[in-house]
Image (cartoon, rainbow, N blue to C red):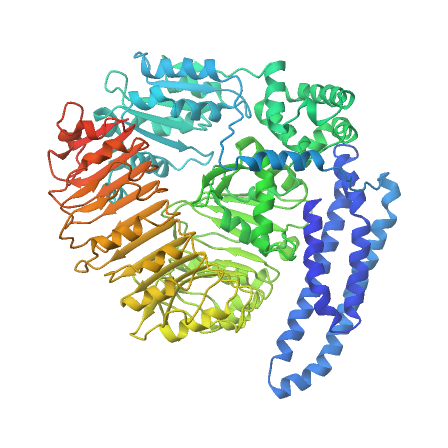
């Protein structure tokens, strides 16, 4: 249902342009009106899912296809005419005649679509579909929103009846010695992963074990990836992690086994699907008696739990009983007596209890139901859900999580990327608000309804990554395939599998295995309407160059209606040029070639006038090649997000004059005078720029009112005037000769994250530190690469009351820093402190003992004996005895010379 509405959004945005071209706009508007008329009947079709399922589903698919056809025909015509009108005088003269031809063709095409829509409308009686109108009640949801927004940073885990299970598992992990594996077994949705997370973060567990690793094992288990991820998490230094990437699988396995023998490790393997998967991994886990390390695994397969360790402990979470189910349901719906009169409350509670019986005590099913009902205010609406329970549980995915089913299982989806994909597909309608803001609000609603899980939060506490629970993804997959919304191909070197749909395919996700030399992209007439193609590959994926070129050329010639093309992380042994046929994809709105070995972007990319997002980051990172980028970006007036490689070759790049949509520009090199052109980009939010030349930028000569994030490399002090021209930034990174910080930094009230990097011989005096510690909103501070304190003649002093909101501090490579003093009352909210490669004579400041909020201390690259002074019984232990987690590593990063305490 929602995808149908999104189709209409795309057509609605084109109608104003069509009306400028004549009667065609009226024809499109008429067809769209007919489609909108059927919107209420589509709701009934959704609610009656399961009754006359095949016939209704076919009817719905036909309506959706008509909406897509209408958008495709209309947009193609607008692009064709716009292209001709921008040509030479002769071409524009010819355009007058050709427009008439195209108008006739598009008029005929739209009339055919309108006739098809009319026939679909006339067929409504045969399906007994009734029109369902929007309800007006939304007050309970608004009240719920208000309650939740009162405490936006509060964590509400909604965990019920886990206490006994947690304690049982903790006891078996830290006290029982006769088994090496503790298993949590049960059906999907029972809360196995939630329980494992509670155990993993339990205070007793964190104190008992030295180091920890958690990995999700997908159904298509890639052994090396799993082992490499485990070893990376158990390793403490960047140098060691970089070395791991160069090891073969046997070497990784041996080192991982040794690490568990030498240390007391807890390894969590989430979602072990089969005994074969366990058998492929178990050799890296030492046998009982050889280690104090333990394994905690979750599985839906009881056989896996038995084959993992015949002497192991198996725990099966119980389904929630009636009272526990109701408790969880109440938490999610925020259903309380005072919200309604007693009679309505009693009726809704009766309906809720009846629906909960269908959930059979499964926490995930209860969560989905509760999230759905949290937006329905009246008892009649609850009754409607009750009468169509299974259909509504499936409809709980209608807000959009089925789109996340594109991504592989356990894939943590960056919210920025998801937003860009939603926009490219037309899922976010234009309004007075920015589409990015509308998209984030939709995602927040999905999270509040427990449809989507939060992965990580960003600096401003907004959601940074998200993911789908396994069972929710399964449900979305079924729904997406039933509606021909999505087709997934899992392709390995041995075989390719594709579930063939009954009708048109709109979106294609292709999962490729390692080192493919051949893959045939099967063309199907039903696929010619394809709108989205996303490639997913494992780490270190290698593609034969000839195959890669063939695949690209094939899809560029075959799928000319694509709106989305994601061709990322694909390494070819030889660099390649992107085929000029890329210019055929004139409807394309999202193009990512990130982390591919590409040497040249063709000038035909300038034909992509609908493009909103272009991501070329890392395209030359593999072998130091410089990507050639033609100066055609100025043609793309709809660009919103541009990510370039760190260094490019070719002409200087320019953007469309007054490009009002552009919000992100990453990795551009400009002179100071060219920087003034960016002032015209009035909606620019993020800018990463390298300033070259010695031109002076006068203070107050430019202003970036909407910029929120600035990363700048520059080598003259005048660059600070650029920083001060951004009054609302919250994230700042400066790389260059940092001699003196301007006092005007204090007038950046939103500055939350600051990174200073630079050259070894620059000197930053102590009065600059006084400026930093007065920044009112600063929460994260990175002093890196000798920039800030490279040559510091006196002690670094954090004075009482300084850094009032600082939560994270990183000092890296400050090799000349001899002394650091922390006065009592300084950094009152600091929770994490990282220090790496500082002076050999560096010592932990005595005043750190007053920073009682400190939870994590990591010190790397220190001299031998440094850690022993800080360990329990050492002469400096009193400074850090209150810190929960401590890791100290010397220059050689040997396990025998590491000190851990958790």
Please report the residue visible at 54 percent of the width from the left and 61 percent of the height from the top. 612
Residue 478 quadrant: top right
Q: Position of residue 211 (x, y in %)?
A: 29, 28
Task: Name the residue at the front extreme.
Answer: 800
- Asked if residue 188 shows in the view, the reply is yes
Quarter of the picture containing the C terminus is: top left
Q: Is residue 610 left or right of residue 272?
A: right
Q: Is residue 856 left or right of residue 326?
A: left
Q: Position of residue 390 (x, y in %)?
A: 70, 29
- Asked if residue 532 shows in the view, the reply is no
**783 vs 21, nearest the viewer:** 783
Q: Position of residue 194 (x, y in %)?
A: 48, 26
Residue 233 quadrant: top left
Against 531, residue 627 (above or below) is: below
**428 vs 885, nearest the viewer:** 885
Q: Is residue 55 left or right of residue 466?
A: right
**637 vs 437, nearest the viewer:** 437
Residue 114 quadrant: bottom right
Please report the residue visible at 57 percent of the width from the left and 23 percent of the height from the top. 363
Q: Is residue 355 left or right of residue 440?
A: right
Against 290, residue 49 (above or below) is: below
Task: Name the residue at the bottom extreme.
Answer: 90
């Amino acid at each position: 249902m929602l995808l149908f509405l999104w189709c209409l959004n795309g057509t609605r945005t084109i109608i104003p342009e069509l009306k400028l071209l004549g009667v065609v706009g009226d024809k499109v508007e008429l067809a769209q009106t007919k489609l909108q008329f059927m919107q209420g009947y589509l709701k009934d079709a959704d609610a009656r899912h399961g009754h006359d399922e095949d016939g209704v589903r076919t009817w719905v698919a036909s309506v959706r296809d008509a909406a897509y056809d209408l958008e495709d025909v209309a947009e193609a015509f607008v692009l064709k005419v716009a292209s001709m009108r921008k040509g030479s005088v002769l071409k524009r003269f010819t355009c007058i005649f050709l427009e008439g031809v195209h108008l006739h063709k598009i008029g005929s095409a739209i009339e055919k679509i309108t006739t098809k829509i009319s026939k679909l409308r006339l067929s409504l009686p045969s399906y007994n579909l009734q029109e369902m109108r929007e309800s007006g009640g939304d007050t309970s949801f608004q009240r719920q929103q208000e309650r939740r927004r009162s405490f936006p940073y509060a964590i509400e885990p909604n965990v019920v009846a886990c206490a006994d299970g947690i304690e049982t598992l903790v006891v078996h992990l830290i006290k029982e010695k006769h088994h090496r594996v503790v298993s949590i077994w049960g059906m999907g949705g029972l809360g196995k992963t939630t329980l494992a997370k509670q155990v993993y973060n339990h205070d007793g567990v964190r104190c008992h074990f030295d180091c920890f690793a958690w990995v999700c094992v997908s159904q298509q288990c890639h052994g090396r990836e799993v082992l490499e991820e485990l070893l990376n998490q158990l390793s403490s230094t960047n140098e060691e992690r970089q070395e791991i990437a160069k090891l073969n699988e046997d070497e990784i396995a041996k080192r991982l086994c040794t690490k568990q023998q030498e240390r007391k490790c807890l390894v969590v393997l989430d979602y072990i699907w089969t005994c074969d998967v366990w058998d492929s991994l178990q050799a890296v886990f030492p046998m009982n008696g050889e280690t104090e390390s333990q394994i905690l695994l979750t599985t839906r397969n009881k056989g896996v739990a038995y084959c993992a360790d015949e002497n192991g402990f198996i725990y099966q979470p119980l389904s929630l009983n009636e009272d526990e189910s109701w408790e969880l349901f109440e938490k999610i719906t925020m259903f309380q007596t005072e919200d309604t009169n007693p009679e309505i409350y009693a009726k809704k509670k009766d309906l809720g209890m009846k629906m909960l019986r269908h959930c059979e005590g499964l926490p995930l099913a209860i969560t989905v139901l509760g999230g759905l009902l949290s937006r329905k205010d009246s008892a009649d609406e609850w009754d409607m859900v009750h009468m169509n329970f299974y259909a509504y549980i499936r409809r709980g995915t209608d807000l959009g999580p089925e789109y996340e089913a594109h991504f592989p299982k356990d894939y943590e989806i960056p919210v920025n990327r998801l937003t860009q994909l939603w926009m490219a597909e037309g899922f976010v309608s234009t309004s007075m608000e920015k589409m990015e803001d509308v998209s984030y609000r939709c995602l927040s609603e999905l999270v509040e309804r427990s449809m989507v899980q939060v992965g990580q939060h960003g600096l401003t506490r907004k959601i940074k990554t998200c993911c789908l629970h396994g069972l929710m993804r399964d449900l979305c997959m079924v729904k997406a395939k039933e509606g021909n919304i999505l087709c997934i191909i899992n392709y390995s070197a041995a075989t390719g599998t594709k579930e063939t749909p009954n009708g048109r395919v709109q979106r294609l996700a292709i999962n490729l295995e390692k080192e493919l030399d051949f893959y045939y992209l099967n063309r199907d007439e039903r696929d010619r309407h394809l709108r989205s193609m996303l490639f997913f590959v494992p780490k270190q994926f290698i593609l034969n160059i000839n195959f890669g070129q063939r695949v690209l050329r094939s899809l560029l010639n075959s799928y000319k209606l694509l709106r989305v093309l994601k061709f990322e992380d694909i390494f070819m042994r030889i660099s390649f040029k992107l085929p000029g046929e890329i210019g055929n994809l004139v409807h394309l709105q999202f193009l990512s070639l990130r982390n591919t070995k590409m040497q040249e972007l063709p000038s035909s990319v300038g034909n992509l006038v609908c493009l909103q997002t272009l991501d070329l980051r890392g395209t030359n990172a593999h072998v130091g090649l410089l990507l050639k980028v033609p100066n055609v970006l100025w043609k793309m007036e709809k660009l919103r997000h541009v990510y370039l490689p760190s260094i490019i070759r070719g002409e200087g790049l320019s953007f469309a004059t007054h490009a009002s949509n552009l919000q992100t520009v990453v990795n551009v090199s400009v002179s100071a005078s060219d920087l003034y052109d960016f002032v015209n980009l009035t909606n620019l939010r993020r800018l990463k720029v390298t300033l070259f030349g010695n031109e002076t930028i006068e203070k107050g000569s430019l202003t970036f009112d909407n910029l929120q994030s600035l990363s700048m490399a520059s080598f003259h002090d005048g660059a600070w005037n650029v920083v001060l021209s951004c009054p609302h930034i919250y994230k700042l990174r400066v790389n260059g000769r940092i001699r003196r910080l301007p006092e005007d930094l204090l007038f950046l009230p939103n500055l939350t994250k600051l990174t200073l990097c630079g050259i070894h011989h620059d000197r930053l005096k102590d009065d600059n530190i006084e400026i930093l510690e007065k920044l009112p909103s600063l929460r994260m501070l990175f002093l890196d690469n000798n920039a800030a304190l490279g040559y510091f003649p006196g002690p670094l002093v954090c004075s009482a009351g300084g850094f009032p909101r600082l939560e994270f501090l990183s000092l890296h490579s400050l090799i000349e820093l001899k002394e650091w003093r922390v006065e009592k009352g300084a950094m009152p909210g600091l929770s994490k402190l990282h220090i790496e490669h500082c002076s050999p004579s560096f010592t932990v400041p005595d005043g750190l003992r007053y920073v009682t909020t400190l939870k994590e201390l990591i010190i790397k690259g220190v001299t031998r004996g440094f850690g022993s002074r800080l360990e329990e019984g050492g002469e400096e232990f009193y400074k850090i005895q209150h810190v929960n987690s401590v890791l100290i590593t010397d220059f050689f990063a040997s396990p025998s010379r590491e000190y851990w305490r958790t």
